[in-house]
Image (cartoon, rainbow, N blue to C red):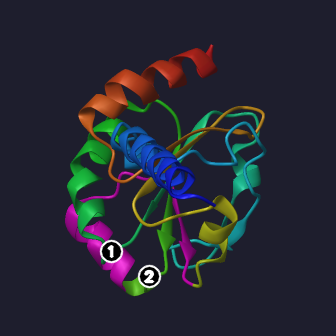
Amino acid sequence: MNRSARVSLVVLVFAALLGLLVAGLHHDPHTIPSPLIGKPAPGFVAPQIEPTSGTVSSAQFKGKVWLLNVWASWCTSCREEHPLLLAFAHGQHVPLVGLDYKDDPVAARHWLAEAGDPYDLVASDANGHIGIDYGVYGVPETYLIDRQGRIVYKQIGPLTVAVLQDKLLPMIRKLSQ
């Protein structure tokens, strides 16, 4: 390969890398696409946090639009979104199910007693297997599930007023019709 061909190759590779960098700068890291969007939500049966006996099953919400909020008592970002979840629960839009992820159930009960419990039911995922089935990257994450049991939206990171008002509530209204 002669010198001009090598220079052309280097310029071409540099331009391709620069193009990838520019494309990456316009990508919001909170909108990582989930391969589960439009697919059935993984089924689960898990111990209930409170009361300490009983289970929570995804089958309980068959035919309903509902939210699954993955959280943990040790999660700082979960504490940020908690007041918003309390306000959401007060509005009684759809069932709000908590999934306590990789957490001690005693710590979770204590935290909910202290901060307020916005959830209709809270399931314990102490070993993280349910979270793995849902493709959880980290907590908090929230999933909107339709009447057919399909995941229609995934929020990575804490919910915000803007996400709730601009995305979730309009989707919930549409799915609830």
Q: Residue 8: x percent and y percent?
A: 51, 47
Q: Which mark is residue 73?
A: 1
What type is the residue that disc 1 sits on? Ser
Q: Magenta stretch: residue 117 in it?
A: yes
Tell whether 60 sits left or right of 66.
Answer: right
Is the Cβ of the residue at disc 1 closer than 8 Å to that at disc 2? yes
Q: Which residue is mark 2?
A: 103
Identify the residue at image location x=31%, y=67%. Answer: 112
Q: Answer whether residue 114 is visible to the viewer in this image.
A: yes
Asked which secondary structure carries label 1, the reply is loop
In the rendered image, the residue lying farthest to the front is 2
**In the foreground, 17 or 104:** 17
Q: Magenta stretch: residue 33 in it?
A: no
Against 130, residue 32 (above or below) is above
Tell whether 163 sits left or right of 65.
Answer: left
Against 138, residue 42 (above or below) is above
Q: Which residues are magenta?
A: 107-126
Q: How many numbered circles does the render carry?
A: 2
Q: Residue 29: x percent and y percent?
A: 39, 49
Q: Which mark is residue 138?
A: none
- 10 Å crowding of disc 1: few (<14), some (14-19), many (20+): many
Against 68, residue 28 (above or below) is above
Q: Which quarter of the rendering shows the C terminus?
A: top right
- 10 Å crowding of disc 2: few (<14), some (14-19), many (20+): some
* Chain-order first, disc 1 or disc 2: 1
